[in-house]
């Protein structure tokens, strides 16, 4: 497994908790969800 750089950012606790719960229910890590969302965001047309 390739190690990726660690990136830190601030997020309100309630949003993190809700996202973490949903990710776990879907069998994903929160990191995977964030990477997928950022990848999709970066692909969007300007």
Image: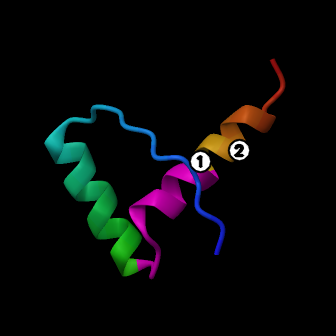
Quadrant for the C terminus, please: top right
Q: Is residue 33 left or right of residue 20?
A: right
Q: Nearer the viewer, residue 5 or 39?
A: 5
Spatial distance from mark 1 to mark 2, Cα to Cα? 5 Å
Check if mark 1's residue and mark 2's residue have beta carbons within 8 Å.
yes
Left of 46 or right of it: where is 24? left
Residue 12, position as x, y percentages in the image: 20, 36
Residue denoted by label 1: 37
Residue sticking out furthest to the right: 45
Is residue 40 found left or right of 23 in the rendered image?
A: right
Residue 7: image quadrant is top left
Q: Which mark is residue 25?
A: none
Relative horizontal placement of residue 29, taking residue 12 as reference (left or right): right
Q: What kind of element bears circle 1? A: helix
Residue 20: quadrant of the picture:
bottom left
Residue 13, horizontal then vertical, whole percent: 15, 43
Q: Which residue is mark 2?
A: 40
Q: Is residue 28 magenta?
A: yes
Tally of numbered tags = 2
Is 23 within the magenta? no
Q: What span is colored magenta in the figure?
A: 26-36
Most foreground residue, 46 or 2? 2
Residue at position x 28%, y 31% from top?
A: 10
Label 2 secondary element: helix
Residue 9 in the image, given as x and y percentages of width and height: 35, 33
SS majority, magenta: helix
Above or below, 6 relative to 42: below
Disc 2 residue crowd, few under 14, some 14–19, many 20+, Cα 10 Å: few
């Amino acid at each position: 497994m390739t190690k990726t750089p660690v990136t830190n950012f601030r997020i309100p606790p309630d949003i993190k908790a809700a996202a973490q719960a949903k990710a776990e229910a879907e069998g994903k890590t929160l990191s995977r969800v964030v990477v997928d969302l950022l990848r999709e965001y970066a692909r969007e047309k300007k």
